[in-house]
Image: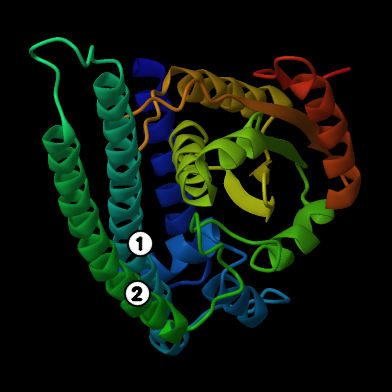
Amino acid sequence: MIWEAQRQAEERWDAEREAMLFLEAHRLAHTPDSHAVALHALRHPGSVLGREVARRTDGGVRLTPDDVDSLRPLLRVHEEAGHSHEAWQRDLGVQAERLESLTTDARQITRDFTSDMAALSGVDRDAPEARGAGDVAGLLEQLIARIAKTERELAELSGHIAALRDRIDTVPRNEDVDPLTGVMTPTGARQMIAELPDLAHGYVLASCGLDDLDAIEARYGRPVADNVVRAFVATLRQSCVGADIIRWQDNLFVLLLRGRPLSHLAMMMEEARGAMLARTLRLRGSGEPIGVVTLSAGVAMGQGAELPEVLDRAEAFRAVASAGQGNRVVSRA
């Protein structure tokens, strides 16, 4: 959409302009390293690098070129952690897809065998074309072959999953980042949250979640529910460019937008709601549609207020939005 592309361009321009102003304020040359440090610190103030920059500049202290050099390892750690996280997330998705496919195959084997046996039992035994024990034996032989093949593939998959689990266990845990979605945790956002009451132009907050996540997990299992959550977060990222996203807890996500009017974030959430509604989510492997998955959200304004107070208001609005069929964004009583 033209409006979305324009807004994304504006957000990128704002970020670049803020980075330029940051470098000018600190009298730093505009090098690739200084630009990367400034841009990351401004866009991710709750990250390790963002907090370290805030600590070093507390009280109006300027960063020096030596500071930039010493901060580069933190930037590399963040980038490498992101690459590592993305790699094992991709592997995990591949293994989940294979598991879903094999589960679908097993169900199909059972359905086919039940159907064939029912057809055999319905044959008129007096008819010339009636099938006998040989037909049953043939069906059993086919069934045994298919089950054996599926068992071999499941055994192989089990080995891959065990190896993947070992890889994941060796990856250093970053409590600042949600391992499923890659967005901030409340721990990762703590510094940013602490600064919210002091923002001169205030902030707006949205609380949102999927309307039917529990039903999806009950019907299809946790791996499918996790994939739906990833799709949900991808939608939020696309529709809410410039907002900080925090996975507050399981199905509660908090979005923060600083120095903008409430209507701006409400419009973003409406766009995310429409985009989520338009998505066709399917099971990997079988391609079976999951059905329509919707979100509900509440949006509230914060001006000199602590986050828990604003979050309570947003949650009250979300409760209204999710009542009944859900699929709503509420920003005023």
**Horizontal arrangement in the rendering, residue 228 relative to residue 47 (left or right):** left
Q: Is residue 175 left or right of residue 303?
A: left
Task: Say whether marks 2 and 1 touch (CB < 8 Å).
Answer: yes
Specify the label residue 164 is tagged with. 2
- Name the residue type under label 1: Leu
Vertical comparison of 181 with 243: above or below: below
Residue 15, how many percent across, how many down?
45, 48
Q: Give the quarter of the figure containing the N terminus.
A: top left
Coloring applied to the structure = rainbow
Q: Is residue 331 visible?
A: no
Q: Earlier in the sequence, mark 2 or mark 1?
A: 1
> Residue shown at 27%/39% (left/top)?
109
Instruction: Find residue 276 and report its horizontal and vertical position in percent.
Output: 49, 25
Mark 2: amino acid: Leu
Question: Which secondary structure, mark 1?
Answer: helix
Relative image position of residue 165 (x, y in whole percent): 41, 76
Question: Which residue is at a point 61% across and 40% down the rendered structure image?
Answer: 218
Numbered disc 2: secondary structure? helix
Q: Is residue 290 above or below residue 91?
A: above
Check the image and name the residue furthest to the left.
128
> What is the distance, in whole Å, between disc 2 and disc 1 at their CAs?
7 Å
Badge 2: residue crowd in 10 Å (few <14, some 14–19, many ≥20): some
Q: Nearer the viewer, residue 196 or 23?
A: 196
Q: Please say whether residue 148 is visible from this viewpoint.
A: yes
Closer to the camera, 273 or 151? 151
| Residue drawn at 26 percent across, 20 percent down | 119
Badge 1: residue crowd in 10 Å (few <14, some 14–19, many ≥20): some
Name the image quarter holding the C terminus.
Answer: top right
**Residue behind mark 1:** 92
